[in-house]
Image (cartoon, helix red, strand yellow):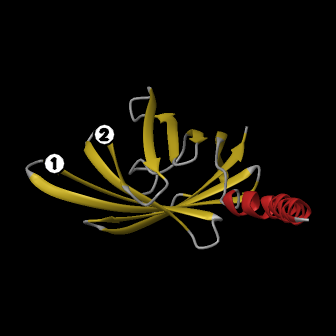
Amino acid sequence: MKKNVTMQILSITVMLAFLCMPLVLNAQGSKAYFSGKWAFNAEKSELGQGGGRMGMGGGDLTVSQEANLLTVERTRQGRDGQTMNITSKYTLDGKESVNTMGMGESKSTATWSADGKSLNIVTKMAFERDGQSMEFTTTETWTLNSPASLTIVSKRDTPNGEVTTTMAYDKK
């Protein structure tokens, strides 16, 4: 008799586990997935006043998203016409990431929106230019409009005020 009860409890436990598994998997996979090659769409983008001059617009993206890491390679034309590749890595757990760029180090924190549909990346960069110390804070909000359409809204606080750009990308 005890064996039958134990077998019934085991059967019910296994059945419940299989029933709950899709819910658990769906909850883990509910965050936006940005991986892929993305082509900059100038017609759908708004670079704002000064956005293009400040290096905030244009260029394609190659994005790799793993469990806790977002790697972004930006490819664009430099002011001298040469192709520039800039790779940045962001942890997706809210911890600070440090990236080295041409002007120095940047420190970024990436956090998901409550619904997991958007990723917010706040980056701070301090450097010296012509003997003056400067600091920029940039907030990027990454949103998938569809599996083939990505929008990145970027707000940069500068010594000359805030600059906002909206960059649209189409999946290649």
Of residue 17 and residue 83, the one placed in the foreground of this image is: 17
In the rendered picture of this protein, how many numbered marks are placed on residues?
2
Instruction: Tell which of 95 and 76 is nearer to you.
Output: 95
* Kind of residue at badge 1: Arg
Q: CA distance from mark 1 to mark 2?
A: 17 Å
User: Residue at the location (41% across, 47% down)?
Assistant: 55
Q: Residue at x 76, y 60 (%)?
A: 26
Q: Earlier in the sequence, mark 1 or mark 2?
A: 2
Position of residue 124 measured from the top left corner of the image (x, y, whole percent): 30, 58
Q: Is residue 36 left or right of residue 49?
A: right
Point out which mark residue 100 bears: 2
Mark in the foreground, 1 or 2: 2
Residue extending furthest top? 82
- Residue matched to label 1: 129
Expressed as whole percent of the image width and height from the top left, the position of residue 7 reads 88, 59
Given contact means CB atoms under 8 Å apart, are the residues at marks 1 and 2 in contact? Answer: no
Q: Nearer the viewer, residue 56 or 121?
A: 121
Q: Residue at x 58, y 43 (%)?
A: 66
- The quadrant the N terminus occupies is bottom right
Query: For this view, does 104 lie left or right of residue 93?
Result: left
Callout 2: SS: strand
Which image quadrant: the C terminus? top right
Q: Is residue 33 left or right of residue 159?
A: right
Residue 89, image x, y percentages: 44, 43
Residue 52 appears in the rendering: yes
Residue type, label 2: Thr
Within 10 Å of disc 1 (Cα), the crowding (few <14, some 14-19, many 20+) is few
Location of residue 46 with respect to 67 vertically, above or below: below
